Image (cartoon, rainbow, N blue to C red):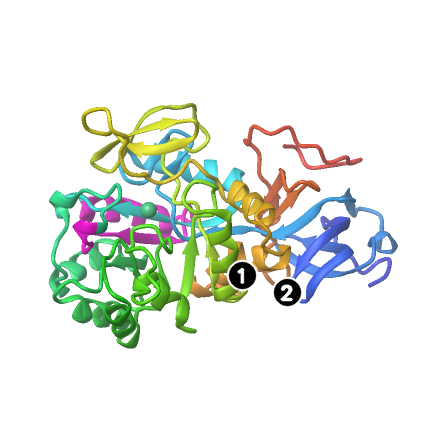
Amino acid sequence: MGQGVVPGGSVLLAGGLAVTPGGVLDPGWILVTGDLIGAAGEGDGHDLAAPGLEVVEMRGRWVLPGFIDLHVHGGGGTSFTEGTADDARNAAAFHRAHGSTSMLASLVTAPLAELEARAAMLAGLADQGVIAGLHLEGPFLSAARRGAQDPRHMLVPDVAVFERLYAAAGGHLRVITLAPELPGAAEVIRAAVRAGVTVAVGHTDATAEVTSAAVEVGATHATHLFNGMRPWHHREPGAAGALLDREAVTCEIVADGVHLHDMTIRLAARAAGPGRLVLVTDAMAAAGMPDGRYRLGPKQVDVAGGVARLVGEAGKPGAIAGSTATMATVVRHAVAAGVPVPEVAAAASTTPARVLGISERTGALRPGLFADLVVCDEEFRLDAVMRHGQWLSGFPAEPSISRARGPSL
Ligand SMILES: [Zn+2]
């Protein structure tokens, strides 16, 4: 592409480490035209310079596809699980500013009427494009592996209940997490698959055999692999083993340095491979906020040193209750743990886009897709976020991109 053919109003991200589906372009350039990626290529891109083309220097910086978080309850002090629509908007804006250019809003187990009301409210935000849809983490879960979920409101799987929740979500229910060992689970899995909803196995005490049977009838996703599941045993690998073993299953991990040992992160990444690993935050309201007391659905959570735990009884620390991570921090942690950068980018963006069925719009630095991207420095600290061709503002880190006519952050 030479002088004169660059459309007006375009932005050239020049000379960065661009993580594309074909590999890392080092250096590489990305041309943003309107809300789309117009072109991308190898080299510093300076030969594209033309009058009216804004050039942003990316030298030494990583340019990654915008992150897509399939499992997030809140952030920035508010959440999807309680509060007003504006509170939910605030949580979404917080995570967008920290790299999640698309996200599902995840609900936790709560009284059915409350779940229906939350689903209806969030469906309105999905209609407006604030979120990419809903994830129901409950209510068909196992009390034995409840984590921070409230066992009082857990229900036995029931197609009629699923249909009520599906209807409340107004066509925006994308993922439902359930425990496949519960009676009636297979019928709900089939109903969800028929409705086009991804079935995730999680908060489950299922054996490997029962989990494999759930995959046979249509489950295709693992909710925070290892967390909320029976521990791996070499003769009974449990849900974690069965889900990792199955090619059809994508596996979420919370790579925040709290939920999993780094060795577990590396082993899961290797076992799942680049097309099946999914990085999620499982973040709650306290993400980006000081230590203190917060809520997660009907439960209270204490955050100390950035680790969220249920308020414990008799001075004992409670179960880990979501995280205070952002997609930017789990990406940084996964890289530090030794997962190769292209695999991290796939797990944070390309694969979750596929799970949501939005790969033709976002999830890679590829011409024709939305210009949804994240800029990080050499150490993978977040520098800037672009969504649909617009730089987003509002994150606390000082942007450090040097630019002549740069974005206003
Ligand atoms: Zn969760």
Quarter of the picture holding the C terminus:
top right
Spot occupied by residue 64 in the image (x, y as percentages of width and height) = 63, 52
Checking the image for residue 21, the label placed there is 2
Task: Name the residue type under label 1.
Answer: Thr
Spot occupied by residue 234 in the image (x, y as percentages of width and height) = 35, 64
Task: Name the residue type under label 2.
Answer: Pro
Q: Is mark 1 within 8 Å of ligand 1?
A: no
- Does 354 sit above or below residue 77? below
Instruction: Determine contact: label 2, label 1, CB under 8 Å.
Output: yes
199 or 335: nearer the eye? 335
Badge 2 local density, few (<14 within 10 Å), some, or many (20+)? Answer: some
46 or 261: nearer the eye? 261
Outermost bottom residue:
216
- Does 44 sit above or below residue 163? above
Badge 1 local density, few (<14 within 10 Å), some, or many (20+)? Answer: many
Outermost front residue:
235
In the image, is residue 116 part of the stretch drawn in magenta?
yes
Q: Is residue 21 visible?
A: yes
Residue at point 39%, 68% (across, down): 249
Q: Is residue 28 left or right of residue 189?
A: right
Magenta residues (range): 115-144
Checking the image for residue 350, the label placed there is 1
Element under disc 1: helix
Element under disc 2: loop
